[in-house]
Amino acid sequence: MTHPFDSIYSHGFIRAAVCIPHVRVADPAFNVERTIALARRASEQQAAVALFPELGLSAYSNDDLFHQDALLDASRSALIQLIDASRDLTPVLLVGAPLRFENKLFNCAVVVYRGQVLGIVPKTYIPNYREFYEKRQFASARDAVAREVPFLDTTVPFGNDLIFEATNVAGFALHAEICEDVWTPIPPSTYAALAGATVLANLSASNITVGKADYRRDLCASQSGKCIAAYLYSAAGPGESTTDLAWDGHALIYENNTLLAESQRFAADEQVITADIDLERLIQDRMRMTSFQDSVADHRERLRTLRRVPFHFQVPAGPVPLQRTIYRFPYVPSDPTSLDERCYEVYNIQVHGLMKRLQATGIQKVVIGVSGGLDSTQALIVAARTMDRLGLPRENILAYTMPGFATSRTTRNNAHALMKALGVSAHEIDIRPSALQMLRDIGHPFANEEEVYDVTFENVQAGERTSHLFRLANFHGGLVLGTGDLSELALGWATYGVGDHMSHYNVNASVPKTLIQYLIRWVANTHQFGEEASRILHAILETEISPELIPHRNGDQERPAQSTEAKIGPYELQDFNLYYITRFGFRPSKVAYLAYHAWRDKNQGPWPDLLPLDKRHEYDLATIKKWLEVFLYRFFQISQFKRSALPNGPKVGSGGSLSPRGDWRAPSDSESVVWLEELRRNVPA
Ligand SMILES: Nc1ncnc2c1ncn2[C@@H]1O[C@H](COP(=O)(O)OP(=O)(O)OC[C@H]2O[C@@H]([n+]3cccc(C(=O)O)c3)[C@H](O)[C@@H]2O)[C@@H](O)[C@H]1O
Ligand SMILES: Nc1ncnc2c1ncn2[C@@H]1O[C@H](COP(=O)(O)OP(=O)(O)OP(=O)(O)O)[C@@H](O)[C@H]1O
Ligand SMILES: NC(=O)CC[C@H](N)C(=O)O
């Protein structure tokens, strides 16, 4: 890496600024002074792009004054002053000015970078309806004859087909359009995006009327989403003429349908909003989304005609801290309303999956092992709701708790209490005799009372439970419900084949552990199964996560002896890693960078509403690196064979399926070296 770890510019981000200056109508000298002042503010914030409103140097609302030579000359002088002032500024500046070429007047976006004009983009769609009379003053980009125009002592590219491409920053490709352009069915930026532009900027002078702010948000959100791009929008604000119209200074920054920053509308002060755009995320999504590339192919001929203007972007040296909210729990929404909706949705997906399977097979019973841990609790809740929805009695859920050599009193009691509270058919089977028989049969030292607690000892117990469940299913005409979650599948934390890996149908396969914790907490807090069930669910949430396959050496049977998270890492970190690696394909150093940003300070940042205060954690970079290394090794090197042979189960979320038929196809015999080396090389901890 050529830049420091703690700069956004080392991790595929650029900072974008959208500026709303004060203007005076027909006063370019004043307007350029305000434009330069805000450009400096954007530069101090180390932005790579700074966008200004449409015709900002002259003001937009000049009407027929645009045909006055004095105003046009003054606008041009203001532009020259701005170009000169830009020499020592960090961002590419996009400013609006009325400019004469070919004896026509164009409404232009001028792209200025460090004392040079990279290109001039005339507005394409000139509105001439209702309150707009722009055709009276301006020609359109389509009226231009020349593709280059003389400007000052040089010639510059001119047209709506220009993409300004930083040759040294991967994915930084900028396009400019002007206000009405985005109101059309196919804005010029659509073609630019198909041809590779990732940052689409709109210089606007949109007057405000009731309801229009929402419409602008919709336009920008959907243009950024459809184009898999950033969309920057800057609408004229204070100082424009109110002869017939009003102005609210609406600035917006979207990335792929997500709002990253918005100005305060009708503000008295000038504003500069900024947001960090994740260019790599956009490129990743374009690479994966085959329909985007099909669309490129369909418009190939036109796209070939677009012109690229290369420039070298001087990347700010030194640290540039990230200005972006990175949620600690990517699978769990942090605002309470979304969390409610998410929980409702996830349960419904799981329940509908199981309902269909039961209806299709005509099977009316499910068989499930209930440990008193989180996953079997979640699956049991899903099974209970499924029976309710199908109008079948909950007794059709044949639930078995099956204590082994290491089952603690706490989880066993919780398992019994839960089965009772949910009204399912509750049973207990001691698996120790059959496990001991197998250990004896295979010659394992434990059969001779030696304390050998190896993986065979563990898997014999997991296998005995599974073996019992499948035979019980045959015996009672039921279907074995799987419980293993997405996080366990990612880490290979399950016993393959004859073990908890196998079932007839697994409702949890696409639900990560951190989300299961919230789902259970949500059910408990909203008392969906009564007070007693809520009490037990809270007790289950409090219990240490453990496979309970190895006993305490001191004979303590009260609580679990093994800690899963001490071995494979905190699930909250591993789920974070899982999301960014599978959903976006980010390199490990970027995942570590994002994790550090999210997790370094427990007093900072957004938290899912239901997380108790005393459960908050924080991690330093060394700890993040250590557990990411565990994740990478387990995920890429040793566990894919388990995912390649998965039972059926519904996909629940984007970036949330590891089924080879769902969303993740990978070889069972790959290496992990490229990920591990990248992490070791590029994360300084
Ligand atoms: N690429 C590949 N293709 C085909 N087979 C492959 C393979 N790599 C290993 N194998 C074979 O697979 C076997 C290893 O896999 P496996 O038998 O699953 O065993 P393994 O993954 O070594 O052990 C299971 C682990 O999961 C943990 N566990 C089990 C049950 C529940 C929970 C929980 O808390 O949820 C955790 C348990 O503590 C243990 O650490 C070996 O026999 C090996 O030869
Ligand atoms: N004592 C037990 N009785 C019955 N079934 C069990 C027992 N221990 C494990 N199982 C079955 O094996 C599955 C895997 O065990 P594991 O310990 O990973 O899961 P869990 O306890 O439900 O959840 P968690 O992994 O969150 O602790 C369980 O979900 C359950 O179906
Ligand atoms: N300046 C413009 O092009 C404004 C037109 C745009 N349709 C709007 O209403 O905001």
Image: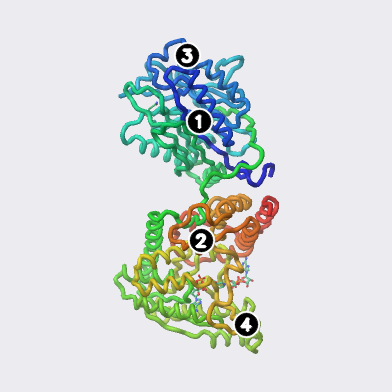
What whole-number distance in Å separates the C-alpha atoms at marks 3 and 4? 87 Å
Inspect this view and state whether residue 180 appears.
Answer: no
Residue occupying image coordinates x 55% and y 32%: 41
What whole-number distance in Å separates the C-alpha atoms at marks 1 and 3? 21 Å
Crowding near pointer 1: few (<14 within 10 Å), some, many (20+)?
many
Inspect this view and state whether residue 603 appears.
Answer: yes
Labels 4 and 1: the sequence-earlier one: 1
Crowding near pointer 4: few (<14 within 10 Å), some, many (20+)?
few
Q: Which residue is mark 1?
A: 51
Q: Is residue 342 above or below residue 150?
A: below
Q: Which residue is mark 2?
A: 659
**Foreground mark, 3 or 2?**
3
Place of residue 282 in the rendered image (x, y in percent of width and height, measured from the top left)? 53, 43
What whole-number distance in Å separates the C-alpha atoms at marks 3 and 2? 63 Å
Front-lying residue, 23 or 403: 23
Q: Which mark is residue 72?
A: 3
Callout 3, which amino acid? Leu
Q: Which mark is residue 206?
A: none
Q: Which residue is mark 4?
A: 553
Mark 1 touches mark 3? (CB < 8 Å): no
What whole-number distance in Å separates the C-alpha atoms at marks 2 and 4? 38 Å
Q: Quadrant of residue 569?
A: bottom right
Place of residue 363 in the rendered image (x, y in percent of width and height, measured from the top left)? 36, 73
Most extreme residue toward the bottom, as rendered?
A: 448
Callout 4, which amino acid? Arg
What whole-number distance in Å separates the C-alpha atoms at marks 4 and 1? 66 Å
Report whether the residue tagged 4 is closer than 8 Å to ligand 1: no
Mark 3 touches mark 2? (CB < 8 Å): no
